[in-house]
Structures are given as structure tokens and as C-alpha cells.
Amino acid sequence: MDIELLEIRDFLAANHPFDQLPEAALAELPTMLQVRYFRRSTIISETNSLESFLYLIRTGAVEVFNLENEILARLGEGDVFGYRASHRPNQIEHHCTALEDTLIYQLSAQDVDKLCEHHTQFAYFFSSVVGDRLRDAINQATQVTSSQVNLITTPIRELIQREPVTISPSATIHETARKMSKERVSSILVCAKGQLAGIVTDRDLRNRVVAEALDVNLPITEIMTFNPSSLKDDTFAFQAQLHMARRNIHHLPITRGDGIAGIVTATDLTKYQTASVVYMVSDIYKQNKIERMQEVANKIPDLLVNMAVAEASADSVGHLITSITDAITSRLLQLAEERLGPPPVNYVWVAAGSQARNEQTAKSDQDNCMIIDDAYNPKLHADYFRELAKFVCDGLNACGYIYCPGEMMAITDKWRQPLAVWKGYFDKWIDQPEPMSLMLTSVFFDMRRVFGSRNIFREIAEYALEKTRGNRIFLAFMAGNALSHQPPIGFFRNFVLIKGGEHNQTFDVKHNGIVPIVDLARVYSLAAGSKAVNTLDRLDVVAEGGEVTSEGAHDLKDALEFICYLRIQHQARLIKAGEPADNFMSPDHLSHFERNHLKDAFSVVRTMQNTLSQRYKM
């Protein structure tokens, strides 16, 4: 291959979806391309023509217009346009013009069809539905699922439940079945002179003996699996799970030295999957000193890194990390009550923000409040609840959950009030939705009880929902507030980055990527009168109720999962480098695959924001 073709191949390999092709296909592809040069303002493809090419921009820029001659997108180097497999033959509903002098690689639709036929991941890119591409991206990014989260650093020997049950190769099928029944095992190892020779499972007995009416007096060697796959006992559990999945086996012999240590089943791995978080939570409730709780809390960054390495789903990470925050909070409240005595009146400790939604990643600042029974008497009870809130908020800060810069914590007098006062807060916020009120409702409409009275929490939650149900004026203000956070993507589908300062050439993935989706879900959820708080739960509810189309809700869920997944990977990289986790991501640290699908995710958010804007005439 000459140098020019090598350069083209390398460019293709660096850009999605061509990076999904194997080396052999990439090597052939440059000879199939046409190289086209378009002068500025030249029409590349026209409306109402049949699209028969896929275009890849090598240099330059292209503008895409709709039938009304409105700009739909501006594309730059590495972007593709044209062919769409799901609409072949595809009549163009837009036209494309060179914005500047542009060099393009052109591939015929017939050649694209052939590539799609043989390469599924390449084909998936050409789905006309952005959400489908996002779902595929998530599947690729999280091929190791959340069930591996707590198997990463655990040796497989720790999952062995009992001594191995073995039998001689000379035993009959009947004798083997009797021994399995007596020992109550679903598999048995066939050993000769201490060495593993085979394995028999209950499935073998069903499929090879019962189903075939085989003579049970035949030797077990007639149905056993010879020389079964095995692993050493120091293998990590997640590696064992991958090993079993790849071979579609459910029973895995484990060796130690020259002997057999035992057997691990798929069920054993499933039972163990949340053990490390369960252990941490259990350990927290055993602690009587904040210093000891702090030691447990200090393990959270490593846990996040482990989950990132395992490529756990963002939803799983959020629930697991938040479960630790809840445990620390609850234990601090228990210790506070032991120190101060039982509360003089009932109260409920409420989490707000990401903790309420079960969407925490790396430890964040505090968002909490306290709602006290209306029997509260300031003269008699104020000191008790002030001390309790101080103990808990100080303890959370010591454990790494820093004080909220906006002081939205129970330690602040305003956010530690009786139920009647809280009802007054919601009355004001909903009836007089000025900017500060909208900001506060964005925080406190995400509420979840962590500790204390269920009745008090139920009453305030139902009161707030009833105030908003059918309140179109308030919902319109909430919608306007939700649109204040825009995804960081420009006309060129390029990232809009922070200019100058500490975070130069980055974008804030939390406030400009995740918050817009959280805000959209909140508005639609309130419109539906739903009690759901978790963002994915809210999107499910509003899709079922018709507030959002099923497709729109699904696309938003996939966008949220992919954005959060990249955020978790980013934070894990920082933690491993010894730096504090943050939300400022640089596109330079993303692969072309990740950049491309992140743009898809941001496009979904922008589309759904436009839909919300039209609904409330913003």
C-alpha cells in the first residue's frame, strides 16, 4: 500500500464509524473511495435527489439545510453525512453545501451496504435514530456489566462454598446421580488419581440421560465433559465471570497447586455481586466514632475506580455510592441521638439533590434539611435540634461531604423548621416563582427521606405535589428554568468549551450535560404529578403517562447513561492520578467514538429542550 493510501486508512481508522471495522476491511477501503474537492458554496447533495453516497469530511466544513433553507447542522473534519441504511433508497430531505473549500472522501451506497452486511457495529451507526446509536454506544462501553462491580479485587477462592464433591471415572451414571442427590450439588467433578478428568452437571443428566433414555448403568464417562475449563484459585472473580460467560458455562472448577480447590457456579457469582458495598455499609453501622467512619468513607474513591474499571452502569454506580452516603448519614443521626438523648418531638432528615435521586458519584457537597413535627416549641426544642444538625453536618464534612457553599443544610436555621413552615416555603416558591424560588424548588423537589418520621415526609411530599398538579403557570416557569442549562455543543456539532481560567478548554459535564436531563425529567414528572425522584424512574413514569413519547424518554435515558458513564470514567482517571474528582472534561481525553456519541447525547438533550420550549411557549 502506497503512502497516500496508508494515510487515508489511518484517517479512517481514527474516525467513527470506520474505527469499528477490522484491519482487513480498513486495508481495502481506501481503494474503494473517491476523493472529491468542493469549492466554497458548492452544493454537495441536493434536496429531492436520491442519496447514493456516504461522505466523510477530510478537511473543511459543510452546512446542512432543511427544506425551509434553515441550517440544521454544521459539520467539520471527521464528520460523516449522506447515506442512511434504514432509508435506502433514501430521498434527501435536506441539502448540503460546502461552507469553505472542502476535501471529501466519498463511498458508494453499494459499498456501504456490503460493509454493513458483514460488520454489525459499523452498520449500527447508520441508524436514523440517534437514540439507537446511543444505546449501541452504551452497550459497547459497558460490555462488562454492573454485576461485575464488586468482583474486581476478589480472588475466586473466596467464593468457593464447600469442599469439592468428586467421583471416580469408573462410577456409573446411576451412582453419580445418587451421590449428587445425597450431597445436594448441581455438579460433580470426575477425578482420576487426584487429577481433574471431567465434570458432570444436572443439565447433563437431564439432556444426555433422561431425554435420551440412556442406560444408567453405563460409566459416567459416557456423558461427562472431558478436560473441562478451569481456573487457578488466585484468579480474580470478575475474570472468572468473564471466562464463564465467554464459554457459556455455569460451573467452573477451581484448582490450587496440583489439586482441586472446589467449584464456583454462576449463582455464587451473582450472590456475591454487591458484597463489597454491603460490607462497607455494615462496617459503617458498627462505628461509634467519626474518625472510624471517616476511614470507611475514604474507601469510596477506590470503590468508584473499581466500578469504573468494571465499566458498571452509571445507574448502578449512583445507587451504590448513594447507599454509602445514606448509611453514613443514618449512623451519624443514631450517634447524635445517643449523645443528646431521644428527640423531644418527631422529625425527618431529608436528602436533596443527587443524594435524593440516588445519583451520586464521587463524594459531593451536602444538600440536606430537617422537617420537624408541628409540636415543635422553639424555646424548648431549638437547642436539641440545632446540636443534632451540627453534629451530623460536621460529621458529614469530616467524612468528605463538604459543607454546601449555598448553606442548604440542616445546620442552617432556615432549613431546619417545623412542617407548617415548610408548607409555607412551598406556597411561596410555587405561588411566586421568581428566580430564587425556582432555584430552591429545583433542589427541594428532589427530596428523599433518609432517617426519621415517614409520616412527616409523606405529608410534605404530597402537599408539594398537590400544589403543582395542574399549575401550568408554575410549570412554565420551571420549564424556563430547566432551559437555562444548555448542552455544550455548537452549530458545527463541535464542543463549546470554557475559555480561560482554571478549566480552560473543558466543558462542565455536570451542569451542561447531566443537569439539563435532570431538569427536563423533573418538569415532566411534576406535570404528571409523580412521586418519583430518580431521573430514570421519572422518565419511565412520564413515558407511561404520555407526558413524553416513549422514544423521547428512552433517548433521554440513554443520553443520561452515556454522559454519566463518561463522567465516571473521567473522575476515576483523576482519582487514579492522585487528583480530586471534578466535572470538567476535555474532549482531548475522549476517543473519537466517545466524542461522536457524546455529541449524539447532547443533540438528544437539545431536541428535547426544544420540545419542552414549544410545549410551554418559551
Image (cartoon, helix red, strand yellow):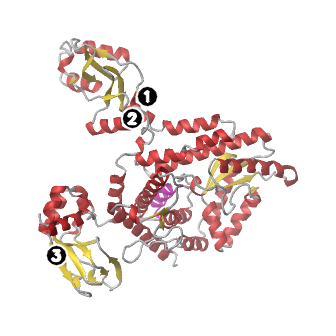
- Circle 2 sits in a helix, a strand or a loop, which is it? helix
Relative side of 453 to 577, left or right: right
Q: Is residue 536 magenta?
A: yes
Residue carrying label 1: 158
Q: CA distance from mark 3 to mark 2?
A: 50 Å
User: Tag 1, which secondary structure?
Assistant: helix
Q: Position of residue 550 (x, y in %)?
A: 40, 61
Residue 461 left/right relative to 240: right
Whole-percent x, y for residue 392 in the image: 71, 48
Residue 181, compared with residue 38, is above or below; it is: above
Q: Which residue is mark 3?
A: 35
Which label was assigned to residue 133?
A: none
Q: Which residues are magenta?
A: 534-546
Residue 453, magenta (yes or no): no
Query: Which label's residue is closer to the chain start, 2 or 1?
Result: 1
Q: Main secondary structure of the magenta part?
A: helix
Dots 2, 1 in contact, CB < 8 A: yes
